[in-house]
Each structure stands twice: as C-alpha cells, then as structure tokens.
Image (cartoon, rainbow, N blue to C red):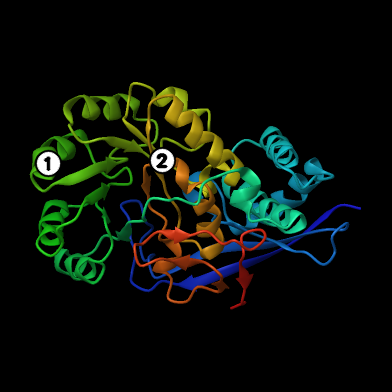
Amino acid sequence: MGLTLRHEVLSLVLRDPFRIARSDPGSGSRITTVLVELRDDRFPELVGLGEGYPDHFYGETPETMAAVFPMLLDVIGSFEPTTTGLRDAEARMAAAIRGAGATRCAIDIALHDLAGKVVGVPVHALLGLSVDLPPTDFTIGIDAPEVVAERARRAADFPALKIKVGGPADLATLQAVRGVYAGPIRVDANTGWTRADAEALLPELVDLGVELIEQPFGPRAYRDLGWLQERSSLPIVADESCVLPEDLEALRDVVAGINVKLAKCGGIGPAQRMLSEGRELGFRTFLGCMEETSVGIAASAVVGSLAEWIDLDGCLLLADDPVDGLELGPDKRWRLSERPGLGLSYKGT
C-alpha cells in the first residue's frame, strides 16, 4: 500500500516571446514544465494532479526532479487526506531535502488535489481559505519598446501590468507602455540592475506612476536592496531573494514586500505559511508564478486571498494550455472551482 507517481515533461509554446533579464540566450519561445499524476492504493479511482516548474536558476531540471521524486514519496510514506496529513507530508519532504522547490511543489499540489477529491471538497475549503482573490496582473517580457507597448495595448483590460526590465531600453520601454496604458505598472528587473541603474531610474519610475519594483539586484544583495528601499518611496519586493520560509528573517527591515511562488518554496502548504508569516512580520505580500499550466496557477490561486498583489498569469502566456477547468472572470480574478480538489482535467499534449 502506498503512493505512486507518474510524471510527464511538457515543452509548451509561448503565445509571445518572453524574456527576462536573466534569460539564457535564444530562450523565450518555449517553456518546460513537469506535470505529475499521483495515486494512492487506497483510492484507486482517484488521481491527484500536480505541477512543478524546474528553473535551473534554483538548481532544478526535469532530470533532477525525476531523480528526487522516488525519495520524496518514500519519506512521505502513508498519507492522510486531512490538513494535518498534508502538513505532515510537507514537513517530511522539507526535512528530507533543502530546496528542490519545484519537485516538492509537484507532489504537494498533487497531494492537495487528491485529498480534496477523497474528502469531496475543493482544496480551498479543505484549508479554510477564502475565494475572494485580488485580480491578477499581466506580465510582458523584455523586447523592443514599441513591441512591449503593443503588447501592453492588447492587455489594457488587465487592472495592472508587470513589465520585465533589466536592459538598456528600460526607460524607453516604460515610457512607451505609459503612452498606451493608464493603469498601475509593476516593474520587475529579475536581478538585472546595478545601483547606478536604480539611482538613475528611480525618479523616472516615480514620475511614470510605477507601483512597485521587484528584485532589482542579486539574490543575496541585501545591502543593495536595503540601500534602495531607504531611498525609494516605492515598495521594493524580493523575489529571487525570497525562496524558502527561512529567507523571511533575512529580509526583515530590508525590503517592503516579498514575492512568494509555489515552485520556489515547495507548493501550496509552504506558500500558505510564507504568506501568513510574511504578513505577521509586516511585509506586503505578492503571490507570483512561473510560466505554468492551469495546474500551477489554480494551486497558487488557492492561497491568493493571503496576498495583496497577484501575478498569476503563467497559463495565459501559453499558446495552448493543456489543462481544463480554471476560469478567469471578466474582472481578471481567478474563480476557484467548487469541484473536489482543484477541479481540473489534463487534456494531454
């Protein structure tokens, strides 16, 4: 008796080219993600869907995920489909391996989906979380200023846009976006700035009505992050510096906000804990994502009520999402399913 897992590596085409400051040369047209189907011998008719997005920036690939899956299933052992059982499985995985966020995330999401199906309730109800979510923004990658502006014009019905920066055309790009879009602009440099870049751009960003600045410097550049936050009226939000729950303490009195992502921290359980602890510590909370299918986005939306800002648009960036069941309302708020589990079905590719 026990858990068994099947995983599938998906290579999916993006709707538009998507590059960030730390993208590899030639990347940006496709993404690689890993879907899993988890089964428990006690409930043979039920399958838990999960997803983990391997990012080599955090030391993961599809190959490392495949190697670690059996070990994590072994340490989980028997699984109880309750909130206590889910937290116990989370703790066992975290104790077995540090990091491996995407690998743990795939299993954690699948466990939550399976538990909801066993009990017959949606995951958000199982965890006692609200369905009242902030609207998601829409993200546009680095490109020529006129190209970014055209994509911003097409996405003008979103209540906020997140613009990737970290190159020589940052100011021209943001000016071009402001020329076609009147709403809040969120700027994400993905570690691509120097102090000189930030100092020169900061007054321009304020004038352009930018709402926040995400991860301007490197992951452990705490002094630089604190230096900029001291000078900035805009909140600085840590992303690459905020991976696991233990990172929160290092960011206290350094930045105003944290960006929590399931694929970084290990799934629904760790994300719920990070967002809750972050709020208690006085951080402004941002819930982000990778370029995931609806599995990763639906799982992230489960904890969306704990975030002030939401950037859950990964599946919207795909040319074809192979997963059904997730609905985006006209107000750009994700509607959590009332079906058991996450309420999703995998169509295949």
Q: Which residue is mark 2?
A: 240
Residue 243 vs residue 46: left or right? left
- Does 238 appear above or below 69? above
Mark 2 element type: loop
Across and down, in percent, residue 29 comes to 39, 70
Quadrant, the C terminus = bottom right
Q: CA distance from mark 2 to mark 1?
A: 23 Å
- Callout 1 amino acid: Val
Number of the label disc, if any, that sits on residue 51:
none
Residue at x-position 33% and y-position 46%: 190
To which quarter of the image does residue 158 belong?
bottom left
To which quarter of the image does residue 101 belong?
top right
Residue 314 vs residue 147: left or right? right
- Does 180 appear above or below 225? below
Q: Using a 10 Å C-alpha cutoff, classify the residue at mark 2 as few (fewer than 14 neighbours), some (14 to 19) or many (20 or more).
A: many
Across and down, in percent, residue 56 comes to 50, 51
Q: Which residue is mark 1?
A: 206
Residue 24 vs residue 85: left or right? left
